[in-house]
Image: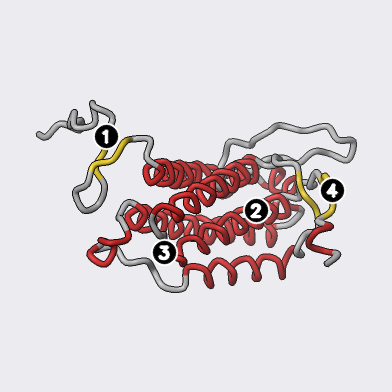
Amino acid sequence: MKRIYTRTGDKGTTGIHGGERVPKDDIRIEANGTLDELNCHLGVVRSLLWRNPVPPDMTGRTSDALTGRTSEALTESTTDSLTGNDAHLDYRHNRANEVDALLHEIQENLMVVMSQVATPAAKREDNPNPLPEHLVEDCEAQMDAISERIGTGAYFLLPGGTPVSSQLQLARAVCRRAERLLWTLNRHDPVPEEILKYINRLSDLLFVLARENMNMQEWPEERWREFTYKNHK
């Protein structure tokens, strides 16, 4: 059985696609490490999708943070307290399945993006992992569909709320950091334009998904200030 460790990085370098070795703190490695971090956060979100928090009551006090049960296992009384009706519970269950599938697809897309980022521009044509088609358009379509249901939102929000929403906001922030690092890399070695656009749209999609989860759980948004720079142009 081969060992998981190789010892090849003990001198502070790591290999990239094409055989070249670069310092472990090279901007290409920083960017890819941040994309990997983002992917891990999305895995956490997927693990939380079936945990149903109880929203704060009208006085601002919070009930039990988590039920600790899947939606199938909820009792009738708990179902009533969380959703008010079976139809809404069914919708939340189905939507959780859809979001899980969406995040799974995003995770796979990020693996391809990381492969492309790990490859110098001069050797990118030889990369066996082509970018999926319509990455940006698919993100925009998802955002448009969600916004149609819950509204576009007009405020900066304090990150938090449900466990899923909180983790999605954290993933959004990591996504923004990945975007900044990719633009730094782009100044040294061109990054495919589709990747730069995709990571930008992905951070927006994660924000919208966070809002949607709070909306489904009937959890109030904590607003900071209005998006005046967007809404009053």
For disc 4, the marked residue is: 225
Are dots 2 and 1 in contact, CB under 8 Å? no
Mark 2: few/some/many CA within 10 Å (<14, 14-19, 20+)? many
Position in image of residue 12 (x %, y %) = 28, 29
Classify the position of the C terminus by image quarter: bottom right
- Residue corresponding to mark 1: 13
Give the numbered dot on residue 192: 3
Q: Nearer the viewer, residue 83 or 228?
A: 228
Q: Disc 2 or 1, which lies upstream in sequence?
A: 1
Q: CA distance from mark 2 to mark 1?
A: 35 Å
**Number of the front mark, 3 or 2:** 3
Q: Rounded to the nearest whole Å, what is the CA distance between mark 3 and mark 2?
A: 24 Å
Residue type highlighted by circle 1: Thr
Q: According to the image, label 2 marks what residue?
A: 207
Query: Alpha-carbon distance for marks 1 and 3?
Result: 24 Å
Q: In the rendered view, would you say 161 is above or below 199?
A: above
Q: Earlier in the sequence, mark 4 or mark 3?
A: 3
Residue 177 is situated, as x and y percent measured from the top left of the image, at: 55, 45
In primary-sequence order, the first of circles 3 and 2 is 3
Amino acid found under the numbered disc labelled 4: Arg
Residue 191: image location, x then y, percent: 41, 59
Q: Amino acid at mark 2?
A: Phe
Q: Residues within 10 Å of mark 4 (few under 14, many from 20)?
A: few
Give the amino acid at mark 3.
Pro
Q: What residue do we see at 84% from left, 48% from top? A: 225
Give the SS element for disc 2.
helix
Q: Is residue 88 left or right of residue 98?
A: right
Q: Position of residue 126 (x, y in %)?
A: 22, 64
- Dot in front, 2 or 4: 4
